[in-house]
Image (spheres, rainbow, N blue to C red):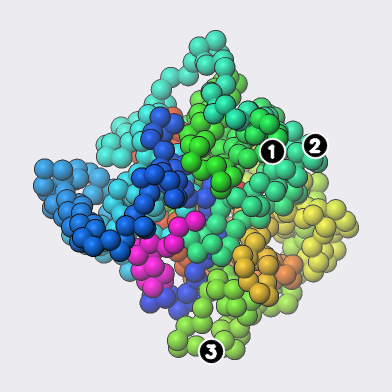
Amino acid sequence: MSEPSTSQQKAKEKVKAVDPEPIESSAHADDAEDDSESEGSEPDDEPEPAPGAAGSSSAAQANTPGTASKKKKKKQSKALKALNALRGGKDAIPEDVVKIVLEKVRAEGGEAAANADQETVRLALEQMKLKDVLQGKTGIGGKNKKDTGGHKFWGTQPVPQLGDAPPEEDGPIEPSKPREEVRQEPYPLPKEFTWSMLDINDPAQLRELYELLSGHYVEDDDASFRFQYSAEFLSWALKPPGYHQDWHIGVRVASSKKLVAFISAVPVTVRVRSNIINASEVNFLCVHKKLRSKRLAPVLIKEVTRQCNLRGVFQALYTAGVLIPTPVSSCRYFHRCLNIPKLVDVGFTGVPSTMTLARMIRMHKVPERPRLLDQGLREIEERDVPQVCDLFARYMRRFDMSPVFNEDEIRHQFLSGMGEGRRGGETWKQPREGQVVWTYVVENPKTHKITDYFSFYSLPSTIIKHPKHNLLNAAYLFYYGTETAFEERAEESGRLKKRLDELVGDALIVADNAKFDVLNAMTLMDNVCFLSDLKFGQGDGILNFYLYNWRTPPLAGATAIGGVPAGKGVGVVML
C-alpha cells in the first residue's frame, strides 16, 4: 500500500478541525480490493517497471550531479501543465468534469466543503494527483480506497462516462443479448494461471478464500488495518437464495493450484426509482499483492460479467472508494465509538484537544440494557419472517434505490447468519459462536404485530503490527424499519426521528454488550437524521455506488440532490 497522499493527510486534519469526535477510520471505507497502480491498468497497457528493474533507477540517480535539478524542472513542467489545464490552456479540463469534481468535493468534504466553489476546486486540484483522481487510482478524500480496474478500462464498458449529461430517462446503456451471442469461452489469463470456480460449501475451498482475503484484501493507506472476513461471513454473503457457483470466480497458479485472485457476484433484485432490475451484486475483488503487475483485475471483472451475461443478467451493482466512471451516488462513513480506550490506542480515533480521555469515555458510554425491551424488543424468530418482509418492502419504497427481498431472502439476510447456540431470552448479552448478523424486532405485546426491526452485522479488521491489539471488532448498521414512518406527518413532526433514535440507540447497546469496539453507518436511508444525536462521528471514508449498464440521474447520498434529502436516494447496504 502507498503512503497517504497530501490531500488525504489534509482530509484527516479537516476531520480533526471540524469534528469534536475525530475519527480516522481505516479498514472501514468499503469492501473490495486494495489500491495498486498496476492493477488498474487495461490488460493491454504497458506494465509498470518493477522495483530495481531497468527503467526504475531513479533512486540510484537521486544524488547524481545535475539529475536532481533536471527532475525538479520536469516536475515543475508537469505541475505547470496541470495548472494551465485547470486555468483553461490548450489541454483544459472540460468544464463538466470540473463540475463533477466539485460535486464530489462537496459530497466528501462534509460541512466544511458545503460552500466550495469552482475556484476552490481548481486550487485544490493544483495540489493533487489529478491524473490519479481522474483515472480512479486515488480518491478525492477518504481512506481504504479500492481499485476496480482503472479509468481506461471503464472507458470501454457500458457505464456512464465522466462528463456525460444526466440521462433524460432511466434504462440500459446496451441491450441484452441472447445467450448464443454472449462470449462462450473464458477470457484468457497469463499462461501461468488458470480459472477456478470455487465451491463455498467445501470447507477447504472456503478456507482458501478466507486466507486470500485475510492477507491481501482492503487495507487503509497507513497499512494499519485490513478487513478480516470470517468463513461464516463469507458463507452468509456468498450463498443467498438462488446463488450460482460459477459466479464465485477464482484464479489459481497452474503449477501449484494456489488461489491467488478472486471475484464474486450474487443475484439481487434491485429497484431503481420505478424500475425493477434483475441484477448481480459484484464484490470481493482481490488479487494477491505479489501479482498486482499481472493486470488481473480487469480480466476478473470481464469474466464475472461474462458469467452473469450467460445467465441473462446484464446489470450489476458495485461500490468503490475511488472516482471512476460514474457514481450514481456517494455516501460518507460515520462511526459510533464504543470501546474508546482501545480505539484511541490503535489509532482509529484520537482525543480532541478540548477533552480528556476520561471525559470522552463518559460521553460515549451507553446504557447497560436496551430501552425497548419493555415495548416488546426481542431477537427475530422464524415466525416473524412474513411480517418483517412486509415491513421491509414498504419501508424501503421510501428510497430511490433499494433491494427487493422475498421471504426466503429476508430469512437468509436476517436469520441465517445468527450463529450456533440458544436463541431467545437475553441473548443480546452474549453473541453466539459464529454469529455474523444481529436482528431484533419490536412486537406489540397486545396485538403481536411487528412494529419495528433493526439489524447490524460483524466485520472485524486485523490490526497490523500493534504490540497489544490484533483485532478491531467492528459492527456495521444493516437494515431497519418502523411503522412510525407511515403515520401522518411522522417526519415533519419529528416522530420518525425519535423512533429511529430509540431503535438505533438500542442497536448500540446490543453491539456494546456483544463487545464490539465501534458501530459504523453511512449517509444512506434515514441515517442522516440520527447520526449526530447518537454521537456518530464523521469518518474520512467515502463509498461510491455504481450501476453497470444502467442509466439513471444521480441519487441523494452524502448530500441532497434534486429536492431529495441526503441519504434518501440510497437504500442498499453493501457487505
Which residue is identified by label 1?
258
Which residue is identified by label 2?
202
Q: Earlier in the sequence, mark 2 or mark 1?
A: 2
Q: Earlier in the sequence, mark 1 or mark 3?
A: 1
Q: Main secondary structure of the magenta part?
A: helix
Q: Residues within 10 Å of mark 1 (few under 14, many from 20)?
A: few
Residue 515 lies, in percent from the top left, at: 72, 70
Q: Is residue 162 above or below residue 532?
A: above
Which residue is identified by label 3?
356
- Residues shaded magenta: 1-15
Front residue of this view, candidates 400 and 430? 430
Q: Earlier in the sequence, mark 3 or mark 2?
A: 2
Left or right position of 516 against 20:
right
Front residue of this view, candidates 16 and 363? 16
Q: Is residue 171 above or below residue 22?
A: above
Q: CA distance from mark 3 to mark 2?
A: 50 Å
Q: CA distance from mark 1 to mark 3?
A: 50 Å
